[in-house]
Image (cartoon, helix red, strand yellow):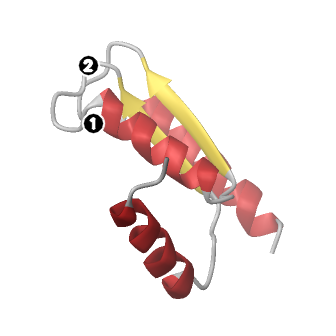
Amino acid sequence: MVTLEELLAQIIYQKNIISKPNIILMHGDLDQVVTIESFLEAKEFFGRHDYEIETKIFKNCEHRIPTEGSSLGLQFIKKHLKQK
């Protein structure tokens, strides 16, 4: 069952969104600044609202972007710039 708060948030969301860019979410499994639950909530939110989303969880990684993340980010940008 949807709460009134969730329903109002959906209405506000739908009225204010004018574009849906492709998104990549990356997260370190040892991150103590942003929890894995927050990462999963964001992933679920964007998926529920029909965003094109890619995700990556890095093993043994805290709150930083590892070299692999920089490479994935660059590949993501190049891939999606070509589509425009």
Mark 2 residue crowding within 10 angstroms, few (<14) / some (14–19) / many (20+): some
Q: Which mark is residue 64?
A: 1
Q: Residue 41: x and y, percent?
A: 41, 41
Tell me, yes or no, if residue 84 can be seen here: yes
Number of marks in the rendered image: 2
Assign a secondary structure to mark 2: loop
72 over 29 or under it: above or below: below
Residue drawn where x is 55% and y is 39% of the image: 71
- Distance from disc 1 to disc 2, alpha carbons, whole Å, reads 10 Å
Residue 82 as seen in the image, left or right of residue 67 = right
Residue 82 as seen in the image, left or right of residue 8 = right
- The type of residue carrying mark 2 is Leu
Q: Residue 79: x and y, percent?
A: 75, 55
Residue drawn where x is 44% and y is 47% of the image: 42
Tell me, yes or no, if residue 66 can be seen here: no
Q: Residue 50: x and y, percent?
A: 69, 58
Mark 1 residue crowding within 10 angstroms, few (<14) / some (14–19) / many (20+): few
Q: Which image quarter holds the C terminus? A: bottom right
- The type of residue carrying mark 1 is Arg
Assign a secondary structure to mark 1: loop
Q: Which residue is mark 2?
A: 30
Instruction: Specify the farthest residue to the left.
Output: 33
74 over 65 or under it: above or below: below
Q: Which mark is residue 33?
A: none
